[in-house]
Image: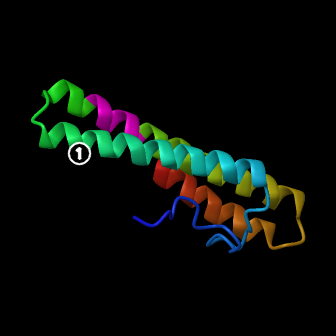
């Protein structure tokens, strides 16, 4: 599987806000790689006919890791948007708000 954990590398996010914060990008990638590992554990648990509790706990961990990555992406974009008010910040804030609500 190709590492698509951070599709924003070198590209603008859909709201037009580039992902400039290297530390945030590293954190997002790490969270998504952790989720990828947890998803592999879910698949293994299902294939090995593990108990319902184990499978659901692993699914919960995957979901939480993905949600946290999404919120980190949005919070980073909001910070960047607010520090550059001349770059169409109002439109970007509205789109980021919509993205935030899709995760909530």
Judge whether residue 103 is colored magenta. Answer: no
Residue 104 seen in the current view: no
- Expressed as whole percent of the image width and height from the top left, the position of residue 41 reads 30, 39
The coloring applied to the image is: rainbow
Is 58 covered by the magenta stretch?
A: yes
Quarter of the image that includes the N terminus? bottom left
Measured from the top left, where is residue 21 in percent x and y? 78, 55
Q: Residue at x 47, y 55 (%)?
A: 102
Task: Classify residue 97 as left or right of residue 102.
Answer: right
In front: 89, or 22?
22
Q: Residue at x 63, y 60 (%)?
A: 96
Residue 41 in view (yes/no): yes
Residue 58 lies in quadrant: top left
On screen, residue 83 versus residue 67, left or right, reads right
In-front residue for pair 49/103: 49
Q: Position of residue 51 (x, y in %)?
A: 13, 27
Residue ID at (80%, 73%): 88
Residue lying at 44% horizontally and 37% vertically, measured from the top left: 64
Q: Farthest residue toward the left?
A: 49
Q: Quick check: 9 above or below 50? A: below
Secondary structure type for disc 1: helix
Q: Give the prevailing secondary structure in the magenta stretch.
A: helix
Instruction: Magenta stretch: give its range.
Output: 57-63
Q: Is residue 6 left or right of residue 84?
A: left
The residue where tag 1 is placed is 43
Q: In the rendered view, would you say 76 is above or below 50?
A: below
Tell me which corner region of the image, top left, top right, bottom left or bottom right, holds residue 91: bottom right
Classed neighbour count for the residue bearing mark 1: other residues with Cα under 10 Å, few (<14), some (14–19), many (≥20): some
């Amino acid at each position: 599987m190709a590492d698509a954990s951070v599709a924003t590398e070198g590209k603008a996010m859909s709201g037009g806000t580039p992902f400039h914060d290297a530390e945030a990008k590293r954190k997002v990638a790490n969270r998504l790689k952790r989720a990828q590992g947890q998803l592999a554990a879910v698949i293994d648990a299902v294939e090995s006919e593990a108990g319902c509790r184990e499978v659901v706990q692993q699914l919960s961990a995957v979901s939480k890791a993905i949600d946290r990555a999404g919120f980190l992406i949005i919070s980073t974009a909001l910070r960047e948007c607010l520090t550059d008010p001349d770059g169409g910040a109002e439109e970007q804030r509205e789109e980021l708000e919509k993205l935030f609500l899709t995760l909530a």
